[in-house]
Amino acid sequence: MINTNLKIYVAGHKGLVGSAIVRELKKKGYKKIIVASRKKLDLTKQLTVLKFLKKIKPDFIFLAAAKVGGVYSNNMYKADYLYENLAIQSNVINGAYLSGVKNLIFLGSSCIYPKKCKQPIKESYMLTGELEPTNDAYALAKIVGIKMCESYNLQYKTNYTCLMPTNTFGPNDNYDELNSHFFPALIKKIHKLKNSKKNSLVLWGNGKAKREVVHVDDIANACVYFMNKKKKPTLINIGTGKDFTIEYYAKLIAKTILPQKKIIIKYDFTKPNGIKKKVMDISLAKKCGWKHKIDLKKSILDTYQSYIKESKAR
């Protein structure tokens, strides 16, 4: 039986995944959800985090806080991505242990896997090859977080689980065209054509790189599902198991949000393509009883409506 009286701390509650976890917890009837803004709690400060966790004494922690961004941002600000993510993860994971918190879910990223990786990507492929150089700093930080969870489980008998989402999108995403992931950047670029005389969309590289995407509400659903599952692996891929080209996504988004306008796709070959193909093996998640539910076209429309609402609120 699910205990909705658990005291649950969500680190990173204002971000894409963290806000979705809060929504999912509320939907499921959880009453004791603890959050703290960056002004109130700087997760890069070790003693501050430890003091906070010892004070609130949560039953469960979702570690969704992270410094995230797209290809350009990851490549330009490597030191920031490495330092901030290592600090946040170390402080929360070690702080959880020192505060007596036995149960935690750490949100990682599919970028932890090697650049030249067999497809679909299994959890066991981590650390079997070189990382994609454009986001290796972020990936290394996430790998350290996974290894921390594994090590604490082994040494201290904790129950810390790592979920590895594929490319995630949805409400509260970052739509900055240089610092965001490719999917929200596409939504913003295509939206800008709505009231413009222009009808051309420029994609980075040749548009043939293949990616898997998943709606953030599916990720949140997986988080709460695995929170309530007592026996589970330490590392689990979360996604749809289906990948399409960037060009395909661009055309689908354009058709979904601008059905009356013919969009012409152009290419900027001076920009990187990124990894050629990337799709997760989600058989372990399925074996544990979880599967994504949200249809891609519906999720694009829902995300676009959220984007419009968020833009007006700014």
Image (cartoon, grey):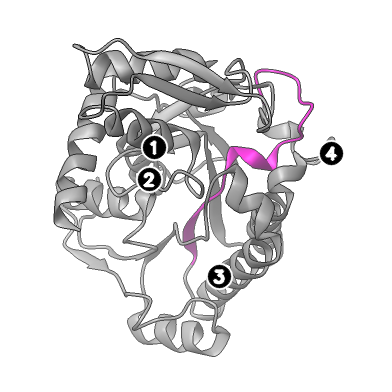
Q: Residue at x 14, y 50 (%)?
A: 312
Q: CA distance from mark 2 to mark 1?
A: 5 Å
Label 4: how many Cα within 10 Å (few below 14, some 14–19, many 20+): some
State which quarter of the image contains the N terminus: top left
The dot on residue 130 is 4
**Kind of residue at disc 2:** Tyr
Of residue 311 and residue 242, the one placed in the foreground of this image is: 311
Q: Secondary structure at mark 4?
A: loop
Which residue is tagged 3?
88
Q: Residue at x 43, y 85 (%)?
A: 54
> Up-down: is 307 above or below 95?
above
Query: Is residue 179 on the magenta stretch?
Result: no
Q: Secondary structure at mark 3?
A: helix
Of residue 257 and residue 210, the one placed in the foreground of this image is: 257
State which quarter of the image contains the C terminus: bottom left
Which residue is tagged 2?
175
- In the rendered image, residue 267, in percent from the top left (x then y), is placed at 57, 20
Mark 2 and 1 residues: CB-CB less than 8 Å, in contact? yes
Q: Secondary structure at mark 1?
A: helix
Magenta-drawn segment: 102-121
Which residue is tagged 1?
184
Upstream in the sequence, badge 3 or badge 2?
Answer: 3
Q: CA distance from mark 3 to mark 1?
A: 25 Å
Q: From this viewpoint, is residue 75 visible?
A: yes
Mark 4 and 2 residues: CB-CB less than 8 Å, in contact? no
The dot on residue 154 is none
127 relative position to 297: left or right: right
Label 2: how many Cα within 10 Å (few below 14, some 14–19, many 20+): many
